[in-house]
Image: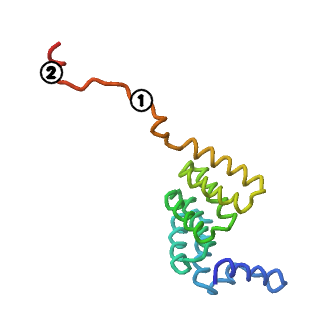
Amino acid sequence: MSLRRVLAVAALIAALGAAPVRACDLVGSSPVLDLYLRAVQLRADGDNDGAAAVLEEARRLASDDPDLALEVARTYAAARRYGAAAAAYAEVAQLAPARLDVALEQARFHLEHAFRVRAAADAAERAARIASGDPEVINLLDRARTAAALAAEPEPSEMPTPLPTRPYNSDSFNSE
């Protein structure tokens, strides 16, 4: 059972007036959920690296859970492991290509860190396909496209012509 379903069931039980559900009541209901709750506690305590390790273990148990993969990406970003976070966001995008929250968060991550802005533009394009009328999405798309254009390497025809130089000749220094 995915993390999202387990949390939804717990919320439904609480909403129906059953006894209040606390995180400690859910412990033992799923090994993935146990690991997730431990990671949440570690992050709350400021141990982002420890939380990332625990979430990696949970991901091995539930490799197809996009919510858990998104939490891994967030934790890597909080731990300033930006390369790992970028890879995790790319994985989440593959697991849930039609989710607006995933596309927006991936684009924002890359833009905020000025890291792989072409990936930000791709994620923003995906978000715009999902929610084409949302002004926030359009604004993000504009920012991402601008950042990608500014970061793009110039075409060879746009590169300045190198200045001519004289070849190095050791004899020219000795003759003067």
- Residue 39 percent location from the top left of the image: 58, 71
- Identify residue type, mark 2: Asp
- Identify residue type, mark 1: Thr
Q: In the image, is residue 133 above or below residue 50? A: above
Q: Residue 151 lies in what quarter of the image?
A: top right
Q: Earlier in the sequence, mark 1 or mark 2?
A: 1
In front of the other: 43 or 149: 149
- Residue 46 percent location from the top left of the image: 58, 62
Residue drawn at x 49%, y 39% is 154
Point out the residue furthest to the right here. 17
Task: Name the residue tied to disc 2.
Answer: 171
Q: Residue 78 lies in what quarter of the image?
A: bottom right
Q: In the image, is residue 103 above or below residue 61? A: above
Where, quadrant-wise, is the C terminus in this rendering?
top left
Q: Mark 1–mark 2 contact, CB under 8 Å?
A: no
Could you tell whether 106 is left or right of 20 in the image?
Answer: left
Could you tell whether 34 is left or right of 131 in the image?
Answer: left
Q: Which label is found at residue 161?
A: 1
Point out the residue furthest to the top here. 176
Image label count:
2
